Image: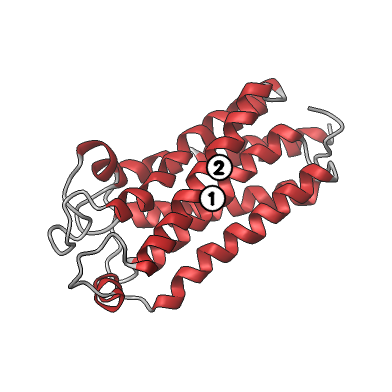
């Protein structure tokens, strides 16, 4: 009976993670959603204020939102089946690595200004997005600390392997979500609020997992 409340809480957290999928399709700022940038190839998020129609920086920035889909699917599979297959958890780690690299790529290219026209300085680019330059250090810090924690969990077998893979994806979504929330802090639309809620849910899930100590002795 003691496991029933825990199972119920897990189910509630997994159910709440589904809201992250909505963040892909809802407008984050102005009238553009991550779906628009990746699939529809709409103009830049600021609708013409950016120098390029298909801005590489925006593609890197919006790609990690799609992690919400494999996070939800993997969480449901792990909850129902008790584990993920080797292919599933390997894919989860791979997606986390790729999307984490996208966030770091946005930061690196944005700061170097390599994707901007010659007459666009870093200061002008950041002025479009409102916040100060140092704001990009926050997601980088989250990624570094999160990656270190995920690696430590695996090496010391502190968490189930399949669960650790899900958390790896959640860490990347959180880092990118925080970055977007900070960049567009002056013009949040519905997608931004959904992203904020998703970040909170993922953090709650990570905190719950950490407190329960799901050891890696069982898959």
- Asked if one can make out residue 163 in the rendered structure from this viewpoint, the answer is yes
Q: Earlier in the sequence, mark 2 or mark 1?
A: 2
Quarter holding residue 5: top right
Task: Identify the image quadrant of the N terminus.
Answer: top right
Number of numbered discs visible in the structure rendering:
2
Residue at x 21%, y 58% (from the top left corner) = 30
Q: Evaluate whether residue 180 shows in this view.
A: no
Q: Is residue 144 left or right of residue 38?
A: right
Q: Position of residue 61 (x, y in %)?
A: 37, 53
Badge 1 marks a residue whose secondary structure is: helix
Binning the other alpha carbons within 10 Å of mark 1 as few (below 14), some (14 to 19) or many (20 upward) gives many
Q: Are marks 2 and 1 in contact (CB under 8 Å)?
A: yes
Q: Which residue is mark 2?
A: 96
Q: In the image shown, does 210 or 114 lie closer to the viewer?
A: 114
Which of the 4 quarters of the picture holds residue 155?
top right
- Residue that badge 1 annotates: 172
Q: Residue at x 24, y 63 (%)?
A: 116
């Amino acid at each position: 009976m003691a496991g029933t409340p825990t199972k119920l809480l897990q189910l509630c957290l997994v159910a709440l993670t589904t809201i992250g999928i909505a963040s892909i399709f809802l407008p984050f700022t102005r009238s553009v959603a991550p779906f628009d940038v990746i699939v529809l190839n709409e103009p830049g998020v600021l609708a013409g204020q950016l120098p390029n129609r298909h801005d590489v920086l925006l593609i890197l920035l919006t790609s990690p939102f799609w992690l919400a889909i494999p996070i939800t699917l993997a969480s449901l599979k792990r909850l129902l089946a008790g584990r993920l297959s080797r292919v599933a958890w390997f894919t989860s780690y791979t997606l986390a690595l790729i999307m984490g690299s996208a966030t770091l790529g946005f930061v690196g290219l944005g700061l170097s200004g390599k994707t901007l026209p010659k007459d666009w300085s870093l200061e002008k680019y950041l002025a479009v997005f409102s916040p100060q330059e140092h704001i990009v250090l926050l997601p980088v810090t989250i990624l570094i600390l999160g990656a270190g924690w995920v690696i430590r969990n695996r090496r010391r077998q502190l968490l189930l392997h399949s669960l650790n893979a899900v958390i790896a994806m959640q860490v990347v979504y959180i880092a990118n979500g925080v970055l977007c929330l900070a960049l567009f802090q002056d013009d949040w639309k519905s997608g931004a609020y959904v992203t904020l809620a998703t970040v909170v849910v993922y953090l709650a899930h990570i905190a719950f997992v950490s407190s329960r100590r799901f050891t890696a002795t069982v898959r």
